[in-house]
Each structure stands twice: as C-alpha cells, then as structure tokens.
Amino acid sequence: MRRLAFGPQQDLHPLNYMIGVTTLDAPIEGLGLHKGLVLAEPGRSAWTFPFANHAPSLL
C-alpha cells in the first residue's frame, strides 16, 4: 500500500526522530474538552488531540 501511494522504498530518508503516542486518562485540567494543546521547544515537542468520544491523546 505504501509503495502504491508514495513510490519506491529508496525514496525514504531516516530523520532520526522518535515518536510516542498514548491516550490520557482525562482531559487536561483548565483546557476545554474540544481544545488541543501544543508545546514546542528546540529538540522536543508535545501535542494533545481532543476527541468527541474519549479522553485526548498525547503525541
């Protein structure tokens, strides 16, 4: 599927990043239920994504 959408494998280039994802137990205190949050600093970042039917996720 990836090859059909993006082309041959030799076009991939490693970026040396690591990504982790989890769901939170509850929305972040003080943040509305339908609002996300982004923290961006040199060399690291964190993003929350709100959902209508469950607690937000954290990337």
Image (cartoon, rainbow, N blue to C red):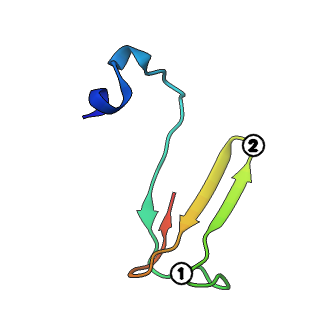
Earlier sequence position, callout 1 versus callout 2: 1
In the picture, measured across the screen, residue 9 lies left or right of residue 11, that is left
* Image location of residue 32, percent across then percent down: 62, 84
16 or 38: nearer the eye?
38
In the picture, measured across the screen, residue 24 lies left or right of residue 28, that is left
Taking the view exactly as shown, the residue that stands out farthest to the right is 42
Q: Residue at x 49, y 45 (%)?
A: 19
Q: Are the residues at dot 1 and dot 2 in contact (C-beta closer than 8 Å)?
A: no
Point out which mark residue 42 bears.
2
Q: Which residue is mark 1?
A: 27
Q: Residues within 10 Å of mark 2 (few under 14, many from 20)?
A: few
In the picture, measured across the screen, residue 36 lies left or right of residue 53, that is right
Taking the view exactly as shown, the residue that stands out farthest to the top is 10
Give the answer, above or below, for where 49 lies relative to 51: above
Secondary structure of the residue carrying tag 1 is: loop
How many numbered markers are drawn?
A: 2
Taking the view exactly as shown, the residue that stands out farthest to the front is 4
Give the answer, above or below, for where 43 lies relative to 22: above
Give the answer, above or below, for where 16 lies relative to 37: above
In the rendered image, which quarter is residue 33 located in?
A: bottom right
The amino acid beneath tag 2 is Pro
Q: Residue at x 46, y 73 (%)?
A: 24
* Image location of residue 27, percent across then percent down: 53, 81
The amino acid beneath tag 1 is Pro
Secondary structure of the residue carrying tag 2 is: loop
Q: Residue at x 33, y 33 (%)?
A: 5
Point out which mark residue 41 bears.
none
11 or 18: nearer the eye?
11
* Image location of residue 22, percent across then percent down: 43, 62
Q: Residue at x 61, y 76 (%)?
A: 35
